[in-house]
Amino acid sequence: MHHLHPLAQHLTLGQALFLGILQGFSELFPISSLGHIIMIKALLHWHFNTHNRHFLSFIVALHLATATALVIYFWKPWWRVLRAYLGSLRRRQFVYDEASKLAWLLVAGTIIVGLVGLLLEKKFRLFFDNPAYLPLVAVFLILNGAVLALGDYLKKRSLRQAAQPKPRRIEELSFPVAAAVGGFQTLALFPGISRSGAAMVGGILAGLSYEEACRFAFMLATPVIGAAGLLKVPALFAPSARAILHLTLPAALAAGVVAYLSTAFLMRYFKTNRLWPFAIYCVLLGAGTLALWHG
């Protein structure tokens, strides 16, 4: 008799596709993909075990698809960056032009979040399985909205006071500042805090325009998301996990397509717009979740 994989018994194809689409936009929009996954699972009473190692691999597959979409969208900058790394090795010189400066700024911005993620990620995964943590996730989402609103306020005030010159380009940042901006991503270990939102606020506070802050946040996120995916995705192809490939592959494809479209939209959006709509959304969703939970 054929037995379904324990995860496949409780996660339907429709749910898997929904999670893929959700990952595709919520990872890039500054609204926290992890927080949304936890809240939707709890509020809709979905019963699959999110602490199951294959579910975590399923989620990482969605992240890998997201990272792939980012690489495809920013393929020209990433090609310049890869050539610059090789050029640095060949010349034995870290910075010799703007491309090499960007390349090593990305390294500086990735180091902190990479180390912290390796050390603490498993502990923060405990939020997945215990529904009692849902109100805390909602509070973090409200805090995410407050951080976005604060970033908007401080940017607007600096422009109004003319205390800040023409917005910087990414290549004009110093390495310590780039590391600090990248370090903002560590806040995303708390479900409800957005990785892209935190990095964008960090970039805005560093003097970048909204568009440049968005580009830097997405390029910083790419190696972090991609490295996590590459480490864990092989588990999906283990014999015991083959039964969920029919869920993982279409969900990952959906995540990748939606992530690409989300990136294209946001890069256009931040040419003329700010973070406040996302701040309002996060506060309202977090408050609404708390009201439903305690109602």
Image (tube, rainbow, N blue to C red):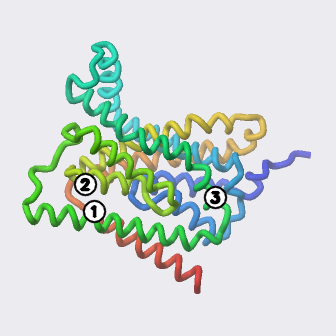
Q: Is residue 125 left or right of residue 211?
A: right
- Residue at the spot of label 2: 204
**Cα gap from disc 1 to disc 3, whole angstroms:** 29 Å
Q: Residue at x 41, y 45 (%)?
A: 260
Q: Quadrant of residue 155?
A: bottom left
Query: CB under 8 Å between callouts 2 and 1?
Result: yes
Mark 2 or 1 closer to N-term? 1
Q: Amino acid at mark 2?
A: Ile
Mark 1 or 3 closer to N-term? 3
The local crowd at label 1, few if under 14, some if 14 to 19, many if 20 or more residues have their Cα within 10 Å, is many
Q: Residue at x 40, y 36 (%)?
A: 71
- In the rendered image, residue 216, in percent from the top left (x then y), is placed at 31, 44
- In the rendered image, residue 275, in percent from the top left (x then y), is placed at 29, 63
**Cα gap from disc 2 to disc 1, whole angstroms:** 7 Å
Check residue 265 in the rendering and tell me which mark sits there, or answer none.
none
Identify which residue, 34 or 179, lies in the foreground. 179
Check residue 151 in the rendering and tell me which mark sits there, or answer none.
1
**Cα gap from disc 2 to disc 3, whole angstroms:** 32 Å
